[in-house]
Amino acid sequence: MSLKCGIVGLPNVGKSTLFNCISSGKAQAANFPFCTIEPNLGITNVPDRRLDALSEICKPDRTIPATVEIVDIAGLVKGASKGEGLGNQFLANIRECDAILHVLRCFQDDNVVHVDGSVDPVRDKEVVDLELQIKDLETVELRISKTEKVAKLGDKEAKKTFELLKRYKAALEQGQNCRSVALLNEEEEHIAKGLFLLTNKPVMYVCNVDEASASKGNAYVEALRKAVAEENAEILVIAAKTESEIAEIEDFEERKMFLEDLGLQESGVVRLIQKAYRLLGLHTFFTIGSDECRAWTIRVGDKAPKAAGTIHTDFERGFIRAEVIKYEDFVALKSESACRAAGKLSTEGKDYTVQDGDIIHFLFNV
């Protein structure tokens, strides 16, 4: 499943440092604008304590976690929508992503230059928003001119698209992102996805703070919270520089002590990866056995046959039924046979919506 999150923001806010922490790849990180030019793609494991618990019980030959793709995209500056800086490339790269991790600088450091000369995450957010809104407005106006003619001829689908485009145009002209426009039904959701608008992508604001602010945030973070209160967007506080130091610690106990000294139970990178996974609308089901325990990635809302197809297309094509055990029941009873005996194994058909954490055995015939 090739869904990916794009790390975006102004130059020098810590995007590449953060990317290096969460990715197996190594993006260049330095104290000057446009350090990242070509987008860097990293595929990282999604930490999941449930998979660890299942492996502890089953003791398989191998354990395979779910993964998520993260893209480090070149920094954006004012005028990007008109081609300033690396604007056109930036906008093209973000269009290819399914969700946005918007990194904002929320720390003071005279040794790290800011492209606008001062630290103000609210202003920085508005700079990026404006450039994306301008580009979206161009797209919407072009689509309106093409759709309006067809809508007036009586085409029902074109008319619905035209009405939604008008609402997007009104929002953009008021300085609002397209994601702020409420969609009325599933049909509008389908139309919206087909428009591929930049400001319609789900977003999480990542506040890059200094080490002292890693656990509680600071005044910059609070100012941003107030600014995005009506967006219904998530905010994550993380100290990218500190996370890079944590990533270098190989000993588990030493790393745990380091985190405790910072007042953290787990690293910010772990939380970021998990939240990025959910931001993409993904969740996990498991298959277990003595040979392998594995986490499989599906979209929230996928039915059992679709989930089976992530293992092999034959499983979906010849789907008969799914035998499902809830994670909590398996951990409590310790085996499939015990779950079956206790009536904790259910048989589900094609209409079953797979839940996060389900342990599933698929039966199929081709």
Image (cartoon, grey):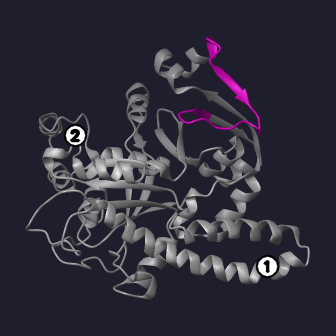
Q: Position of residue 333 (x, y in %)?
A: 50, 15
Q: Is residue 7 above or below residue 281?
A: below
> Mark 1 falls on what kind of element?
helix
Q: Which residue is mark 1?
A: 148
> Mark 2 falls on what kind of element?
loop
The quadrant of the image that shows the N terminus is bottom right
Q: Residue at x 32, y 74 (%)?
A: 75
Q: Is residue 105 left or right of residue 262?
A: right
Q: Position of residue 54 (x, y in %)?
A: 43, 30
Q: Residue at x 39, y 66 (%)?
A: 126
Q: Amino acid at mark 1?
A: Glu
Q: Is residue 181 left or right of residue 329?
A: right
Mainly helix, strand or loop, the magenta region? loop
Graded by Cα atoms within 10 Å as few (under 14), some (14 to 19) or many (20 or more), the crowding at tag 1 reads some
Q: Position of residue 88 (x, y in %)?
A: 44, 84
Residue 309 disc label: none
Graded by Cα atoms within 10 Å as few (under 14), some (14 to 19) or many (20 or more), the crowding at tag 2 reads some
Q: Position of residue 19 (x, y in %)?
A: 30, 62
Q: Earlier in the sequence, mark 1 or mark 2?
A: 1
Q: Residue at x 69, y 70 (%)?
A: 166
Q: Is residue 151 above or below residue 240?
A: below
Q: Residue furthest bottom?
A: 83
Reply yes or no: does residue 26 show up in magenta: no
Residue 215 disc label: 2
Q: Residue furthest right?
A: 154
Q: Residue furthest top?
A: 342
Give, as a single range, the part of the protein colored magenta.
Answer: 340-360
Q: Residue 100: in sight, yes or no?
A: yes
Separation of marks 1 and 2 at Cα, in angstroms: 51 Å
Q: Residue at x 38, y 34 (%)?
A: 49
Q: Amino acid at mark 2?
A: Ser
Q: Residue 272: in sight, yes or no?
A: no
